[in-house]
Image (cartoon, coloured by chain):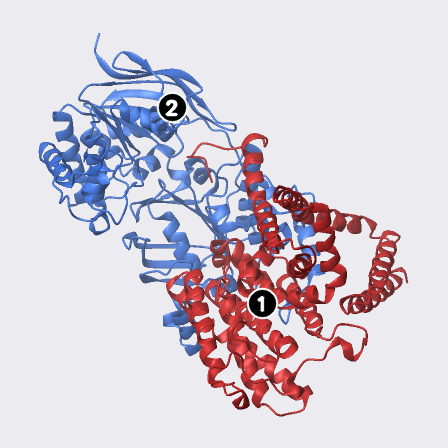
Chain colours: A red, B blue
């Protein structure tokens, strides 16, 4: 009976967590209390159950993985503060505004910013797990967005049919967009870094042509539209406002879909044979091959799935927020996804948090700029420093191994 | 007293786990060809790397032309007119011969490289030493023999008067070897002294004036090549103290071979024949050992048997069933397409049939270091098993299985969840053995099972391999350690330059005889 009680508590805490998260994302800050409560329920039930040790071990290992990013963020904030001080601003005031904007006043913008980043971050993290660098996520993002717009304008069906069709077809085509790079990678060894980047270029610069073909308000008399027609209302994602009346009118359920997809990606990577194969190939392609894993196929599939995830980013952005493509929709979600994945050490769950952090820094920066006149560029500097410091753990490891670790090496002939 | 151009006195080099050289003294006369002979791991390369400034000796002196010198880097060595040609060439593939030779010491006028002068210099050098070469050809278009020639010219361009050649014939065809030896002799006539590192007896006798024999880091003999026999050298090389003893009960082998290899030919990465027309059988309940010096086709052979490398021709029969050499021979259209689109290989089929492999290079081919012990233990497991269903992993079963194996094979790890990279070498090897021996196997291909391990681990692994044999499995053991081959195998095949030189029954031979064949002693004259 003890085990079932435990499961009961876990399910309870999960439900409370989900409710709290939804409320919080919808600008109901009382949601935070729900989240804290659910964590407390879970911790207490785990701690007072028979698998206490494994719970403590889990905490320890999690603490280890998040310590580097946190150090990085902390040091970056200090360095950013120094830069602001030198430039003649009051760093405390600026940071107060930044955080007030990012996590309270403009929290809705932070959440909206995070949605596409979660998807591109997942796309890149997933490819990284197979030791592939899908640098062209930006291109797959555009393909997803364009196909979603095309379908969204033309598909006149009830929402519950048309939205799934749009999601599946658009993301599948974005995945197929990676077909040629994936094939070349497997068959000839052509680096996916080059090929996907070139494909991204093609997609990016096809978008203005697409916009002219599918937009232009005749009454405005413009022959050069800068955005497409709006997609049909039935093809738009539900807004939070429909069930949480006080929340911002722009927040859509895309954020919930993103979190579910992140959990799904985690499940694929760590609980399926495919994920196992992908990680094995990513960590040692030779050993995987020697043990009968069809490495070519695995690499192929990993690149296609990565394309699907990046494509979903575009689909969500069109159906959830923009409802059309703007010509200056050049937000660089593909590129920022690389930062998000790096900061998350390619962990799908961590991607959710790093994407929200990135989105929050952006919206907080805008708030700070509007209210204090401190240039929002400082946010980009802080982001750069964070990433540098997180990547710098390799530098730290290098020096640690060189000077502090007990050296164990054998002569070249004995070396295995 | 004779005048030595180079002396190395009492050189000792200790690595944290191994003593690579112990109190080695050696000298070189002007215009002499000196050979360093020894097995893999005898300490030849370490000694030369010390001379070339790549390592610092723990103790001992290097005396060059009567003066004590200390080299901190190869740069110092080059300054003192030492040149080294490594086994793996250090050339820039898409530059020309001249550009490669002058790299780092370009003749220049006012900051511009003067190519005319460079080409002239290269041509002068090549005329002087009879090393014909086209100075404007790109390296990637040259054969391996000519590339080596460029390396030699590179050393001479830097005015080397002592030239070290590390395993110079390892990558050459017989004809190229002949040419190389002519070149070496002409170098000596022009006053250059040459040191050749090798493990081939025949070459020593053919080209060298004097030879030092190294064994386990120590000089065990110094001989003039005139009047010494191959046998004598082979004895010095392989004769060694017995450290290990495992008792082996005689066992009757099965009647039908488990695996039977016929006329197998395999190409290496450079598309040369690494395994040439090899045939042999392995019966259930016996261990067949393949002895041989590294690089005589053993790794290509093992890769071809498991299917990792596609064989060129020949056939492999497993339990009287012929295995397809590659997927293009498959009758299944989908699998043909798989091979075409995804370069798929058929390792999976062979694993399913009951072939298992312990690879020679455990870090490269055996383990995924950055994954958990449990994850490594299920690597290569077949679809119809208890670890996954419909593509979903069953972690509970996996950890249960892994805990069992950890106990059974005495793998020292805090838990199944530890990364394999945190284990010691011996325990890493145990992970591989646990995985391979617990599969549903009929034939075990075991390569270099004890490389780099300590005595305790070696004994344990040897016992496990014998248990396999006694349980009636067929075992093929490929090892560079002759002693290991002798203590485990029932039959011994000697591999030399891609061919089976001879087959022995272990009880009716000794290490000297096998060693003689390993060094190619049976080849009286090189086929041209």
- Where is residue B273 drawn, in percent x and y? 28, 53
| The C terminus of chain B: image quadrant | top left
Report whether A31 appears left or right of B251: right
Asked if A208 appears above or below A162 in the picture, the reply is above
Secondary element under disc 1, as helix, strand or loop, is: loop
Q: Which mark is residue A157?
A: none
Q: Nearer the viewer, residue B416 or B111?
A: B111
Badge 2: chain ID: B
Badge 1: chain ID: B
Secondary element under disc 2, as helix, strand or loop, is: loop
- Where is residue A306 drawn, in percent x and y? 54, 67
Picture quadrant of residue B236: top left
User: Does the residue at mark 1 contact the one at mark 2 (Cβ under 8 Å)?
Assistant: no
Residue for point 34% across, 44% down: B295
Is residue B162 visible from the viewing direction of this image? yes
Nearer-N-terminus badge (1/2): 2
Q: Residues within 10 Å of mark 1 (few under 14, many from 20)?
A: some
Q: Nearer the viewer, residue A71 or B492?
A: A71
- Where is residue A230 drawn, in percent x and y? 59, 84
Identify the residue under disc 2: B72
Labels 1, 2: front one: 2
Q: Nearer the viewer, residue A346 or B274?
A: A346
Residue for point 52% across, 29% down: B17
Report whether B159 appears left or right of B73: left
Identify the residue under disc 1: B383
Distance from Cα at disc 1 to Cα at disc 2:
55 Å
């Amino acid at each position: 009976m003890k085990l079932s009680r435990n499961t009961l508590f876990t399910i309870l805490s999960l439900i409370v967590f989900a409710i709290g998260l939804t409320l919080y994302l919808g600008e109901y800050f009382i949601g935070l209390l729900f989240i804290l409560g659910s964590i407390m329920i879970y911790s207490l039930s785990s701690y007072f159950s028979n698998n206490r040790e494994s719970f403590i071990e889990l905490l320890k290992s999690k603490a280890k993985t998040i310590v580097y990013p946190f150090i990085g963020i902390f040091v970056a904030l200090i360095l950013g503060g120094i830069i602001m001080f030198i430039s003649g601003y009051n760093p405390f005031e600026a940071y107060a505004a930044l955080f007030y904007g990012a996590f309270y006043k403009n929290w809705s913008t932070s959440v909206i910013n995070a949605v596409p980043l979660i998807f591109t971050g997942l796309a890149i993290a997933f490819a990284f797990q197979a030791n592939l660098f899908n640098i062209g996520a930006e291109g797959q993002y555009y393909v997803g967005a364009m196909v979603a717009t095309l379908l969204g304008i033309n598909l006149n069906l009830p929402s519950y049919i048309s939205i799934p069709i749009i999601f599946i077809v658009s993301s599948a085509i974005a995945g197929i967009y990676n077909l040629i790079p994936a094939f070349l990678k497997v068959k000839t060894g052509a680096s996916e870094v080059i090929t996907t980047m070139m494909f991204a270029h093609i997609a990016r610069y096809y978008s203005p042509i697409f916009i002219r073909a599918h937009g232009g308000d005749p009454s405005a008399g413009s022959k050069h539209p800068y955005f497409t027609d709006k997609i049909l209302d039935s093809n738009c994602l539900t807004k939070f406002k429909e069930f949480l009346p006080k929340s911002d009118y722009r927040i859509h359920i895309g954020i919930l879909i993103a979190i579910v997809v992140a959990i799904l990606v985690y499940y694929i990577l760590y609980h399926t044979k495919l994920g196992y194969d992908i990680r094995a190939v990513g960590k040692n392609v030779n050993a995987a091959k020697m043990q009968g894993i069809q490495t070519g196929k695995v690499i192929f599939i990993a690149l296609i799935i990565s394309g699907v995830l990046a494509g979903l980013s575009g689909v969500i952005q069109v159906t959830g927020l923009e409802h059309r493509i703007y010509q200056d929709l050049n937000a660089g979600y593909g590129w920022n996804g690389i930062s998000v994945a790096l900061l998350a050490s390619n962990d799908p769950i961590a991607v959710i948090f790093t994407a929200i952090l990135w989105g929050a820094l952006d919206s907080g920066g805008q708030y700070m700029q509007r209210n204090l006149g401190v240039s929002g560029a400082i946010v980009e500097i802080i982001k750069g420093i964070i990433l540098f410091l997180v990547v710098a753990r390799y530098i730290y490891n290098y020096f640690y191994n060189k000077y502090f670790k007990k050296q164990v090496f054998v002569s070249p002939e004995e070396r295995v | 007293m004779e005048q030595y151009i180079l002396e190395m006195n009492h050189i000792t080099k200790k690595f944290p786990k191994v003593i690579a050289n112990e109190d080695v003294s050696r000298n070189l006369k002007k215009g002499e060809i000196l050979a360093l002979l020894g097995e893999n791991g005898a300490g030849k390369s370490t000694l030369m790397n010390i001379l070339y400034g790549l390592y610092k000796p723990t103790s001992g002196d290097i005396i060059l032309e009567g003066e004590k010198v200390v080299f901190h880097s190869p740069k110092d060595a080059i300054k003192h007119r030492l040149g080294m040609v490594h086994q793996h060439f250090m050339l820039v593939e898409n530059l020309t011969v001249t550009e490669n030779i002058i790299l780092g010491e370009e003749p220049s006028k006012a900051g511009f490289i003067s190519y005319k002068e460079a080409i002239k210099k290269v041509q002068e050098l090549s005329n002087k030493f009879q090393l014909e070469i086209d100075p404007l050809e790109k390296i990637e278009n040259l054969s391996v023999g000519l590339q080596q020639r460029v390396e030699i010219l590179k050393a001479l361009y830097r005015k080397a008067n002592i030239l070290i050649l590390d395993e110079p014939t390892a990558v050459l065809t017989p004809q190229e070897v002949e040419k190389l030896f002519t070149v070496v002799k002409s170098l000596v006539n022009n006053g250059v002294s040459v040191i050749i590192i090798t493990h081939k007896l025949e070459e020593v006798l053919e080209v060298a004036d004097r030879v030092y024999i190294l064994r386990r880091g120590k000089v065990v003999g110094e001989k003039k090549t005139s009047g010494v026999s191959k046998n004598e050298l082979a004895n010095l090389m392989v004769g060694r103290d017995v450290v290990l003893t495992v008792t082996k009960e005689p066992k009757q082998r099965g009647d039908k071979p488990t695996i039977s290899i016929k006329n197998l030919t395999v190409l290496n990465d450079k598309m040369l024949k690494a395994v040439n027309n090899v045939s042999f059988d392995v019966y259930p309940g016996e261990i067949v050992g393949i002895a041989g010096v590294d690089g005589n086709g053993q790794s290509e052979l093992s890769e071809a048997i498991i299917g990792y490398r596609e064989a060129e021709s020949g056939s492999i029969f497993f339990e009287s069933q012929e295995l397809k050499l590659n997927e293009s021979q498959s009758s299944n259209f989908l699998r043909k397409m798989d091979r075409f689109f995804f370069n798929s290989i058929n390792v999976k089929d062979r694993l399913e049939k009951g072939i298992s492999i312990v690879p020679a290079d455990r870090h490269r081919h055996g383990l995924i270091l950055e994954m958990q012990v449990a994850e490594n233990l299920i690597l290569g497991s077949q679809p119809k098993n208890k670890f996954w269903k419909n593509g979903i992993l069953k972690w509970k079963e996996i950890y249960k299985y892994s805990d069992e194996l950890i106990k059974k094979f005495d793998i020292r790890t805090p838990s199944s969840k530890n990364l394999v990279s945190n284990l010691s070498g011996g325990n890493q090897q145990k992970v591989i053995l646990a995985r391979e021996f617990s599969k549903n196997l009929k034939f075990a291909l075991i390569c270099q099972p004890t490389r780099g391990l300590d005595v305790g681990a070696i004994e344990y692994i040897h016992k496990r391999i014998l248990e396999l044999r006694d349980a009636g499995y067929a075992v093929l053991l490929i090892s560079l350690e002759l002693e290991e081959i002798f203590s485990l195998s029932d039959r011994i095949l000697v591999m030399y330059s891609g061919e089976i030189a001879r087959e022995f029954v272990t009880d009716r031979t000794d290490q000297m005889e096998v060693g003689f064949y390993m060094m190619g002693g049976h080849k009286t004259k090189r086929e041209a």
